[in-house]
Every structure is written in structure tokens, then in C-alpha cells.
Amino acid sequence: MTGTLLKINGVWVTDPDPDSWSPVNCYEWTAGSGRVNTTGLFVGARKFCKYKLPCKWTMLPVADSAEIQSIIEDGPDFAELEFWHNGKYYSISANASDYVPQGLVRLDGGEYYKSCTVTFAER
């Protein structure tokens, strides 16, 4: 597998589909600081941002899927990720949701999954 967008536990994996690749910043708020102001906007004191990475692969070869699943499930409790976002690489430790390969397809002597999904959430 070769890719340039995502490294999981030290292994570069096949790039996720472009339509699914959208790292999201999720803000953590200081306790008791969040409120709605008079214009209806939420304001408060932010502590830091955490990342959430939804990933989806389409028509992923079964062997690549098995390798990604093994990297996630056989690794440490939290995956060490390196990912490309906004013109640079970020490194985080993250929890992985269930890795779900769906729809086995046999084409031209190869086996593929129509869709494989996982979401990583920074701890």
C-alpha cells in the first residue's frame, strides 16, 4: 500500500477517497464558559482543538483492507496518526471507530470491497 495522506501506526496506507477526506477540528471548551450571547452565537473560552478524521475507501482490494484492519485492530489502544491537512502534516493519537468493510465484489480475478469506513477521533 502506498499513500501520502494518512499514516497509521507508522505505516502509510492507501489514500482514502477524496470526497471522504475532511479532517474536522472539534473544539474543547473550558468548563462553565460556554454560553449563547444576545445575538444567538455560542461564545466561550476554548482550551484546544481536537481532530476527527472520517475515512472511506471505495473498491479497496481485500488484501489492502485486511492490512488496514490489522494495523488498526492489532496495534496499541490508541492509533498514532500522521495526516496531511492545510498544507502540512499533523501527528495525533486517536481512537478508531469500528473498521467496516462492506460489499465483497469479484472482478477480473481480484476481490474488492465496495466500501470500507473508519473514523478516528483524537484523544
Image (cartoon, rainbow, N blue to C red):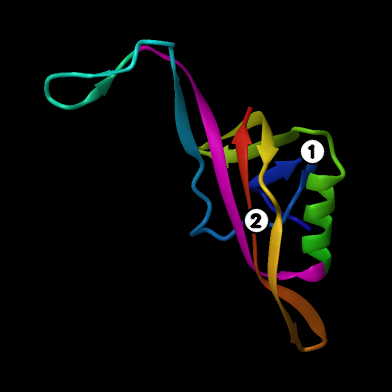
Residue 78 figure quarter: top right
Local crowd size for mark 1, using a 10 Å CA cut-off: few (<14), some (14–19), many (≥20): some
**Residue annotated with mark 1:** 9
- Residue 7, located in which quarter of the rendered image? top right
* Quadrant in the picture for the N terminus: bottom right
Q: Residue at x 77, y 62 (%)?
A: 65
Q: Is residue 77 left or right of residue 20?
A: right
Task: Give the overall secondary structure of the magenta segment.
Answer: strand
What residue is shown at x 54% (from left), y 33% (from top)?
51
Judge whether residue 86 can be spotted in this image. no
Amino acid type, mark 1: Asn
Type of the residue with mark 2:
Asp
Numbered range of the magenta stretch: 45-62
| In magenta stretch: residue 58 | yes
Q: Is residue 106 left or right of residue 88?
A: right
| SS label for mark 2 | loop
State the residue in front, 62 or 29: 29
